[in-house]
Image (cartoon, helix red, strand yellow):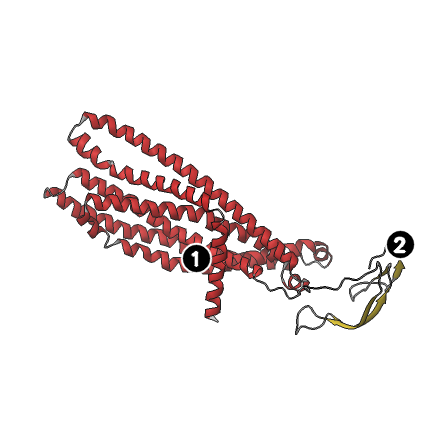
């Protein structure tokens, strides 16, 4: 069973990846924009050394003119890169959300009536509206942030090891611990997000049924009963959302604390090297700036993992519908009936929505002539079965 689930999950990831790769040209352009942003972030930390050593300590007038101009250029490139990446990834996200909405609607329309009979209307609506929007956030927002933050981490690592590799080795003894919250809290967020999405779909279905049957509720004075049921469902949703909030909120302060340990070590060890003359204030502050800027994208990656886990849970619910097998198969070589009108004959026919279920119709025998309209009235109806002639053939 586990191997089957793993292979199914792998096939679903391939489908999502295939949809994303349809826009590979825009993805490449967005990646280039994010590389520009990452390079600009690294340049900010890199420029701290000449500002400290050449301007404030060395009092170099040429650098006093050069560094401000480079700073303006760096911020300009960062702004242009951020705009390009945001636009391109939003375009891809909107395209993907349209693809999945169209695919879901086509699939639900093509599935047999037994599937519609079993599923709640509100649940199906939630798949097309709420779940698809969550997947969009995972694909567009998460992808752009993953690329941007990963490139930024690489740029900061270059600055850190270029400035002082010995101090860098000491600082990165703490960094691996910062990834612990990403793994632990990410699993919890995914679990609670799945429950939250299922509860929201159930709530949508409840609202649809309640509003559709408003007259019946009024007639039988069921208002208080329905209010109680609604409050129970919103209470369940509240608990799940709060558990998800706790899991998300805890990851950030834990990473902040671990990052603080690394910064404290850098200040102690780096200050010791400056006092002994093996480093300069410019190198130290450039290094410290890069490390402090490095922890920010690492922390965002932790928060980003939460978004990804929510998207994975929503994608799983979407593919539960898309992977439904079609039980009614069209014949490859159907027989073409010649003529314009035929009698419709049911000879001892029984029908159930699914195999093993109690039949909805049992041993039905009837014959309908062309142009004749036949009404079958159930227990909740009234009157008798009636037939009438129609000028326009209906069969």
What label sits on residue 189 in the rendered view?
1
Find numbered disc 2 in the image and state the secondary structure of the residue it sits on.
loop
Q: Position of residue 322 (x, y in %)?
A: 57, 59
Q: Position of residue 155 (x, y in %)?
A: 29, 44
Q: Does residue 364 sit above or below 203 in this rendering?
A: below
Taking depth in this image into account, of 146 and 260 the one nearest to the observer is 146
- Residue found at x 48% / y 67%: 5
Numbered circles on residues, count:
2
Q: Residue furthest left?
A: 276
Taking depth in this image into account, of 147 and 187 the one nearest to the observer is 147
In 3D space, how far apart are the residues under numbered discs 2 and 1 (Cα atoms)? 62 Å
Q: Is residue 392 visible?
A: yes
Taking depth in this image into account, of 382 and 72 the one nearest to the observer is 72
Quarter holding residue 251: bottom left
- Residue found at x 26% / y 49%: 260
Q: Position of residue 1 (x, y in %)?
A: 48, 71
Which is more N-terminal, label 1 or label 2? 1
Find numbered disc 1 in the image and state the secondary structure of the residue it sits on.
helix
Taking depth in this image into account, of 17 and 197 the one nearest to the observer is 17
Q: Position of residue 209 (x, y in %)?
A: 66, 57
Residue where numbered disc 2 is placed: 391
- Side (left or right) of 393 relative to 56: right
- Side (left or right) of 351 relative to 207: right
Nearer the camera: disc 2 or disc 1: 2
Quarter holding residue 374: bottom right
């Amino acid at each position: 069973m586990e191997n089957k689930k793993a292979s199914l999950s792998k096939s679903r990831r391939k489908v999502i990846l295939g949809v994303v790769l349809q826009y590979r040209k825009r993805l490449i352009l967005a990646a280039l924009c994010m590389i520009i942003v990452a390079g600009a972030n690294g340049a900010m930390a890199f420029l701290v050394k000449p500002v400290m050593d050449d301007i404030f300590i060395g009092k170099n007038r040429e650098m006093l003119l050069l560094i401000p101009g480079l700073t303006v250029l760096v911020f300009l490139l960062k702004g242009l890169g951020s705009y390009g990446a945001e636009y391109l990834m939003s375009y891809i996200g909107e395209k993907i959300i349209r693809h999945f909405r169209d695919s879901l609607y086509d699939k639900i329309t093509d599935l047999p009536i037994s599937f519609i009979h079993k599923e709640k209307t509100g649940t199906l609506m939630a798949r097309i509206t709420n779940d698809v929007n969550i997947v969009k956030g995972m694909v567009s927002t998460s992808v752009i942030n993953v690329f941007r933050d990963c490139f930024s981490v690489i740029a900061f690592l270059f600055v850190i090891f270029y400035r002082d590799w010995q101090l860098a080795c000491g600082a990165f003894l703490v960094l691996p611990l910062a990834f612990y919250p990403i793994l632990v809290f990410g699993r919890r967020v995914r679990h609670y997000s799945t429950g939250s999405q299922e509860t929201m779909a159930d709530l949508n279905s409840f609202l649809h049924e309640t509003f559709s049957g408003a007259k019946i509720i009024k007639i039988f004075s069921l208002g208080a009963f329905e209010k109680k049921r609604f409050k129970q469902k919103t209470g369940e949703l509240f608990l799940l959302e709060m558990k998800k909030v706790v899991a998300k909120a805890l990851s950030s302060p834990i990473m902040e604390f671990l990052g603080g340990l690394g910064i404290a070590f850098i200040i102690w060890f780096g200050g010791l090297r400056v006092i002994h003359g093996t480093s300069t204030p410019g190198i130290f502050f450039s290094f410290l700036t890069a490390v402090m800027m490095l922890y920010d994208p690492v922390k965002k990656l932790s928060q980003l993992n939460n978004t990804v886990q929510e998207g994975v849970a929503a994608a799983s619910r979407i593919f539960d519908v898309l992977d439904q097998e079609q039980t009614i198969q069209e014949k490859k070589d159907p027989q073409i009936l010649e003529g314009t009108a035929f009698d419709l004959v049911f000879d001892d026919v029984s029908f159930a929505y699914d195999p093993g279920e109690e039949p909805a119709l049992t041993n039905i025998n009837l014959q309908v002539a062309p142009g004749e309209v036949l009404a079958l009235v159930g227990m909740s109806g009234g009157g008798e079965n009636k037939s009438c002639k129609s000028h326009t053939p209906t069969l």
